[in-house]
Amino acid sequence: MPSQDNVIGEAALPRSTPADQGVDGAGIRAFIEAVAPMKGVELHSLMVVRHGHVVAEQWWRPYTPETPQLLYSLSKSFTSTALGFAVAEGLVDLDATVLSYFPEYEDAVADPRSRSIRVRHVAAMASGHENDTVDQAMRVGNGDLLRGFLLIPPDREPGTVFAYNQPCTYALSAIIRKVSGESLTGFLRPRLFTPLGIDRVEWHTDFLGRELGFTGLHAPTEAIAKLGQLYLRHGEWNGRRLLPAEWVAEATRSHIRTDQPDIDWDQGYGFQFWRSRHGYRGDGAFGQLMVILPEADAVVAITSQSPDMPALLEAMWTQLLPALTAGRGGGWSPSSPSLPLPTDTGPAGVLVPTTFLPGPDNQLSTLRTVRVRADDLVLTDGGGHLTARLGEPHAWCTTGSVATAHGWADGRLHVDIVFLETPHRLHVILDPATEKFDARWQTVPLQRPLLSVSHLPR
């Protein structure tokens, strides 16, 4: 394995070779090669853990091991873990109603089904609503997502129907904050983050100061692998009991049928964990994955920009899983610990300082101007300014939490901007002849796509 001194420390997972842990390294390479040409799959990082040892890790430049990336709904599994600690400490009762923790909403919530929603129901996405209520709840609650959620009468009896309903997870975050007096991050820090050596995490909050719970957590890839390893070991970490084994079993079993069209989303749902054809997982939009494989004593952590998540999982079952269960070792030694992401840029050209305005094909309505200076870009939108350096053509150039690559084609400057603390990439085309720009997201951020929020909360 190539040296990874920049990520290996006292708190890091131990490193080993595939051969020493009975893994066929050729299968790991086959997985990477299988997903490389897929149109809807773009890997940013991969970490494979077997028998408690990292046997393979790969980053795709400009992403790096140290950078926390937005996990989207993989955040839910961290929220579930916080719930496990709260239940174990007697702070939360799974059979208590959500409303019982918020007497301030008592008079407003009259619907009997809303009043009967239990903690275990929201943990299993079984509040009785048939659809995601997040937008409606924000309107009904005048920005208070929990109040709005409780004011929307469930379509069926709680506990009888699955719906991937973001306010369910938000309710868990709000309950933990209420009973502990701490933020979700503050509650998890001494119980999970510090024992596991996870020190660089941030969570987006709403205007009430509550962490979203259902999304918004930024964490590095190794933090994903560590949480997966904690669950694989039934709540133990380095011989120390952190989570009760009973909680791990309860959180990761199927509590309700999901009835989803994709096979790996139709295996049932636990407490903020999906059951899979193999093992179980936490996952987030665009391919943020924590796959726990008890049958292989393995964990796979992935960050990516992959709208086609079924294809990514299919490649995992076809190529990677057999390598983990082959029972024989084999070599896997990448030529570099990181590989470059492809860009949409063309050849080199001359940069002329210009201020560009939106063009006719611009898809990013919030972006107002793009200014080219001697060696950088300044993008301005409703959220403020973003400055990004332009390095050598054809090469990624990193400035803080963004990286750029650029080149010329048909007399126009093509710039790719990667927001390193998210999965997302912005394509910008600048036309000096018209002084206009066109911009589009490769994948549109699910929360407000403003430049100022496409990074860690500050």
Image (cartoon, grey):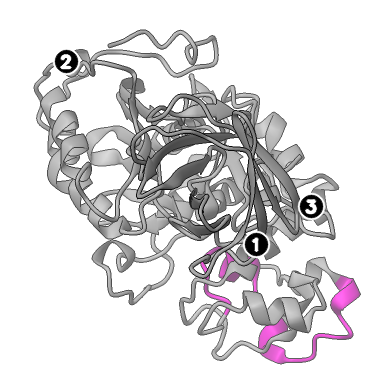
* Residue at mark 1 to residue at mark 2: CA–CA distance: 45 Å
Q: Is residue 124 magenta?
A: yes
| Quarter location, residue 276 | bottom left
Give the numbered dot on residue 19: 2
Badge 3 element: helix
**Residue at 61% from the left image edge and 50% from the top image edge:** 79
From the image, tell me which residue sits under label 3.
177
Give the number of callouts: 3
Q: Amino acid at mark 1?
A: Arg
Badge 2 element: helix
Crowd around label 3: few <14 · some 14–19 · many ≥20 (10 Å)? some
Q: Image check: 378 left or right of 78?
A: right
- Residue 248 lies, with reference to residue 119, above or below; the image says above
State the quadrant of the N terminus.
Answer: top left
* Residue at mark 3 to residue at mark 2: CA–CA distance: 45 Å
Nearest to N terminus: mark 3 or mark 1? 3
Nearest to N terminus: mark 3 or mark 2? 2
Badge 1 element: loop
* Residue at mark 3 to residue at mark 1: CA–CA distance: 25 Å
From the image, tell me which residue sits under label 1.
448
**Residue at 63% from the left image edge and 38% from the top image edge:** 353
Q: Position of residue 106 (x, y in %)?
A: 86, 80
| Quarter location, residue 46 | top left
Crowd around label 2: few <14 · some 14–19 · many ≥20 (10 Å)? some
Q: Nearer the viewer, residue 303 or 211?
A: 303
Q: Image check: 34 left or right of 84?
A: left
Q: Image check: 403 left or right of 173?
A: left
Q: Nearer the viewer, mark 3 or mark 2?
A: 2
Q: Position of residue 25 (x, y in %)?
A: 15, 23
Q: Which residues are magenta?
A: 103-127
